[in-house]
Amino acid sequence: MFRCLAISILLLISVQVYGQSIEYARQIVNTLASDGFKGRGYVENGDSLAADYISQEFEKFGLQSFEDDYYQTFETSVNTFPGIVSLQINEKELKAGTDFLVHPGSPSLKGVFDIIKLTAEELLSDELFVNKLRVSSGHFILINPYDKNKFSTEENERLDDVINFLKFHPQNPSKGTIILTPDKLTWSGSTSKSPRPTLVINANTINDSFKFIELNIQSKFIERYQTQNVVGYLEGINRDSTIVFMAHYDHLGKLGTKTTFNGANDNASGVAMLLNLASYYAENKPTYNLAFIAFGAEELGLIGSRYFTENPLFELSSIKFFLNFDLAGTGDEGIQVVNGSVYKSQFDSLSTINERNDLLPQVKIRGAACNSDHCMFDQKDVPGFYIYTLGGIKAYHDVYDRPETLPLTEFQDYFKLITDFVGQF
């Protein structure tokens, strides 16, 4: 009987320590990825709304700040779309985000424009391309879909160069470029403004017989937009070294007044892991100092993490190890560990803990990759991992990355793996 009671108590403790994480994680994702947070971008202060929320959570857990508050402010240029973004083809209104996207660097433009169509073969022929370009003034150039497998590596490189000329070169006389694609539409951010707009249209939503378009794009380029990192810490028993947890909180924001990129997996889920760890260690004093960093402007080119590593709030040399969480919301196929082969002994420790406790389906090793905020720390020779979950939903940089589609499949086991791993230091 005593043995059964002990097991029951241990199970209850386990639920209290680890079980709370999934409930709190869901709350964080639902909040940060709600329409009210404007996609955590640079329209309607979406980034500031998210930063304020994280700051309040830091305060709730008793995290200390390195300066007067948790904010480390910096500036960036950014192109935004706070007004109307509309497109009609053959009098059919297309929907931003699902039917079409506007290149993130596009300027404002309104009007009705005729179309000049170009095939891949015409793009590859200097004579044919130049002849079409000469008569393109006042028109949009439309590039039909093509199968890259039908062209050589050199030809594909040439096609990319010509398309980039059409999109970005100031000497292109056309009004803009349309790219038809059968692929999923994915968006991004931009810190610069292009000389003309580019539209990417889902080829499955229209037929290619149209001869003109009617559009209204209202963009706003902001030269010096102030945004912020959110940084707090907990003192450990040993105050000479620091373990850093990091995750970017920003996302892509809004494309016009009706389309929001909510970013549930990217990266409300990573912030959920960050805040869960803050909650846990606030109640379980760590061996080492723990810093918690929510980075801004990652989607604009790792700008927040670059600013932090160039203006650190504590000595980078004191960092014993860091863990960067990005895309933490699935896990059906385990996790990928960037820098795993760089810091092999730490990877082996992580993998051993996972196998011993039968947590995630796999812990997959990968080398260095400059694909999230950890990259700025890599460049300063600070040791650490960038970890992201594998499998599950494929929504990424699109309008489908929403809270209701994010399963948080392995979040609880992922959380336990991280706390057990940190306990090895």
Image (cartoon, grey):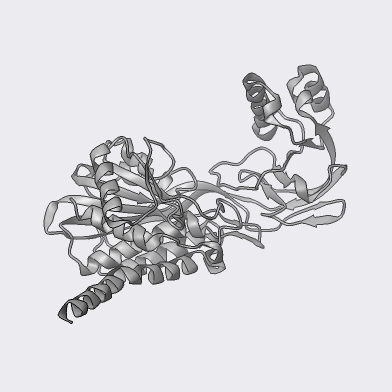
From the viewer's side, name the closer residue of 115 and 10: 10
- Give residue 334's position: percent from left, percent from top: 41, 51
Decide if residue 253 is on the left or right side of residue 100. Answer: left
Q: Decide: is 88 above or below 176.
A: below
Residue sitting nearer the eye, 116 or 209: 209
Residue 250 seen: no
Instruction: Give me the residue at 56% from left, 41% from top.
Output: 192
- Residue ID at (46%, 50%): 390
Q: Residue furthest bottom?
A: 1
* Res 119 visible: yes
Drawn side of residue 263 relative to residue 361, left or right: right
Q: Would residue 109 appear left or right of 348 to someone viewing this image?
A: right
335 versus 44 height, above or below? above
Q: Position of residue 62 (x, y in %)?
A: 25, 69
Judging depth in this view, the residue of 257 and 275 nearest the camera is 275
Q: Quadrant of the N terminus?
A: bottom left
Is 222 above or below relative to 148? below
